[in-house]
Image: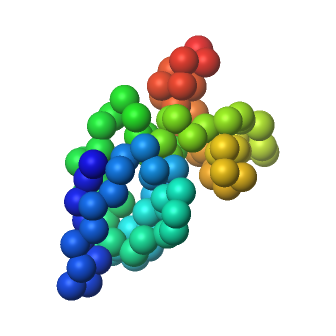
Amino acid sequence: MIGFRSGKRRLIVDLRQIHRIQASNNRSLVFTAREPLVVDESLGAVLERLPADQFMRVSRSHVVNKHWVASLKPCLHGDQTLFLRNGAEVRLSRTRRAECMRWLGLE
């Protein structure tokens, strides 16, 4: 479980329900199995509180949950697309590719 502040509300979210997190200015969009949540923390601040064995920053603007990754597909210029089990697509930047492949156990 992890707690977030969203305006005047305090939200408690099960980590297993979070499939990805996206930067949005100085806030973050936390995409869960139920609904997207706007939280009052930067992507970096959220990432610091998440378990590194389960969550990884895959680009400047996205963090993914390892357990939601279904497949990868190569793109142009060394980038890859991560396909999540819920149908979402997230770009994996070429600068984070090797680290992500090790994290996923693919290298």
- Residue 32: % across, % down: 49, 59
Q: Is residue 26 left or right of residue 101?
A: left
- Of all residues, the one furthest to the top in this rendering is 107
Q: Is residue 2 visible?
A: yes
Labels in figure, total: 0
Vertical placement of residue 67 versus 17, above or below: above
Residue at image location 43% in from the left, 63% down from the top: 30
- Viewed as shown, does residue 29 lie left or right of 86? left
Find residue 91 and report its horizontal and vertical position in percent.
64, 50
Name the residue: 78% across, 45% down.
76
Which of the image's four quarters has the C terminus?
A: top right
**Residue located at (54% from left, 18% from top):** 105
Q: Position of residue 87 (x, y in %)?
A: 72, 52
Pick the front one: 38 or 15: 15
Residue 44 in sight in this render:
no
x then y, percent, for residue 6: 28, 77
Q: Quadrant of residue 43?
A: bottom left
Task: Identify the residue shown where x is 66% and y is 51%.
Answer: 86
Residue 98 found in image quarter: top right
Colouring chosen for the image of the structure: rainbow
Is residue 11 depicted above or below 74 in this figure? below
**Residue 104 or residue 68, whichever sits in front:** 68
